[in-house]
Amino acid sequence: MFVSQSRLPHVLEPNSYHCPEQFERELSRLFQPAWHLVACLDNLSRDGDFVTLELMGKPLIVRNFSGQIHGFLNVCPHRHCLLTHEKQGTSTGFRCQYHGWEFAASGKATKIPDARSFKPMPGGPESLCKFDVQVRGPFVFLSLKDRPEPIERLWPTLMDVCDEFPAHRWKLADCWDYEFSANWKVVVENTVESYHVPAVHPRTLVRFGDESEIEHVIRDDATIMRSPIASPRAYRQIADQLLKWLEPGCKHRYQLYHGFPNLFFMRIDAMLQAMTVVPVSPVSCRMIVYVFTLRARRENLVSRLITWQWGRFKAAIIKKVLAEDARLYPDLQRGMESSPFAGTISTREELVHAFQQYVLRRTVRSH
Ligand code: FES
Ligand SMILES: [Fe+2]
C-alpha cells in the first residue's frame, strides 16, 4: 500500500538541482555529518589490502592492518604527496610513494629515511589525518567528522538491515562506478521510484506489483519499498533451479532501502546490490555500485559455481539497467535548469517526496 492517498507537491524547486548555494548547504548539512560507504570487506580481505577514493573533495585511503580496517586522508604530512595514486592494491608496508615515509595503523610515522636530517622534530614524528571507520556486514563506512554521531543513531533502519547481511555469506561479484552530468538528487530520485520502469526499461526490468502488492515505508532516516516482481517464466524456472542451492524458499521479492541522503541496498533473488551517489559539483555526481551474491550455508563446488555465475549474470543485467537510466540524466538536468514548472509527484513516486522533504528539512535557509 502507498502511504499517501493523493498526489503530492514537488517539494524542491528546479533551482535546487543546480544552484551552488544549495549545493554547499547540502555538503555541510547532509554529507559532512553523514557516514559514507567507502569499501566492502572483499576489497580489503588480506593484510595490506587498500582502496583509495575521492569523497567530498578529499582523497582517502582505507587499508587492512592485520585484520583491522583503518581510514586516512591520502596525503603525506611530509610534502603533501598522495601516499599512492592506485585505486586498489596490496602493500607490505604503509609507505608514501614520494620519499618512503612509513606509517602505523595509528597514522603515526614509524620510519623516516635519513631521519636525522629532520631534527629536531618537536612533538615527535608527524601523523596522517585519521578518520573513524565502522564495519557493518560486508561494508566499510567512514566518517569525515571529528566526533561523528554513532552510525546506528544516524541510520537505524539501514544498520538493522546491514546486520541481516553477515559478511561471510555474501561474495562480491562486481564493483564499479560512474560519473554522471547531473545533480546527485536527480540520480537518487530516479533510484527510488518505479514509475519510470515501463517507459525506460521495457525489456530489461520486469513488472513491479500494483498498489495492493507494493509496500512503502517512510521513516526519518530512510524509506523502504517492497514489491513482488513479475518476471518471465523462463527466468523464474532457471532461478528456482539455481537458487535452491543458495537461498531455499526464495520469494522473488524486491526490497529497496534508501538511507538518507545517498545510500541504497537492493535485495532480491540471492543478490544484494549496494549503491552510493556522491556529489561532485552542483551539476555532477559519481555513483559507486557493489553487487554481491549469496553463498550457500554449506558451500561445495556446485554452490560456489552458482554463486559466481549468478553474480556475473546479475551484474550484467544491473549494468544494462543503469545504462538505460544514465541516458536520461543529462536531459533531466537540462530540464531542471530551464523548467518554469512547479512539478508534481504521484503516490507511486511518494518516496521521492519523502526524500525531498528530508532535504528541505535539513537545508532550509534559516536552519
Ligand atoms: S611526501 Fe611523503 S615521504 Fe615525502
Ligand atoms: Fe531505472
Image (spheres, grey):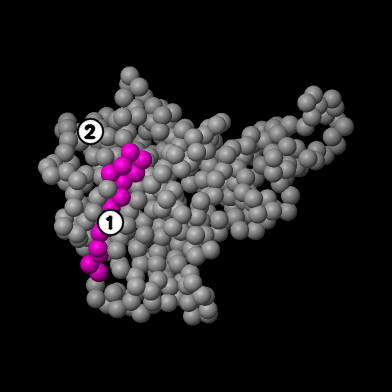
Q: Position of residue 136 (x, y in %)?
A: 51, 51
Give the residue displayed 35% in from the left and 67% down from the top. Answer: 269
Query: Helix, strand or loop at disc 1?
Result: strand
Q: Amino acid at mark 1?
A: Arg
Q: Which residue is mark 2?
A: 11
| 325 lies left or right of 297 | left
Q: Amino acid at mark 2?
A: Val
**In the image, is residue 309 part of the stretch drawn in magenta?**
no
Q: Can the viewer see residue 48?
A: no
Q: Position of residue 63 (x, y in %)?
A: 63, 49
Give the residue displayed 21% in from the left and 63% down from the top. Answer: 207
Give the residue displayed 33% in from the left and 54% down from the top. Answer: 256
Relative to 39, residue 143 above or below = above
Query: Which callout, 2 or 1, points to the residue nearer the camera?
Result: 1
Q: Which residue is mark 1?
A: 226
Depth order, front residue of 89/219? 219
Depth order, front residue of 237/176? 237
Query: Helix, strand or loop at disc 2?
Result: loop
How many neighbours does mark 2 have within 10 angstroms: few (below 14), some (14-19), or many (20 or more)?
A: some
Residue span colored magenta: 218-231
Give the residue displayed 39% in from the left and 27% down from the top. Answer: 25
Q: CA distance from mark 2 to mark 1?
A: 24 Å
Label 2 beta carbon less than 8 Å to ligand 2: no
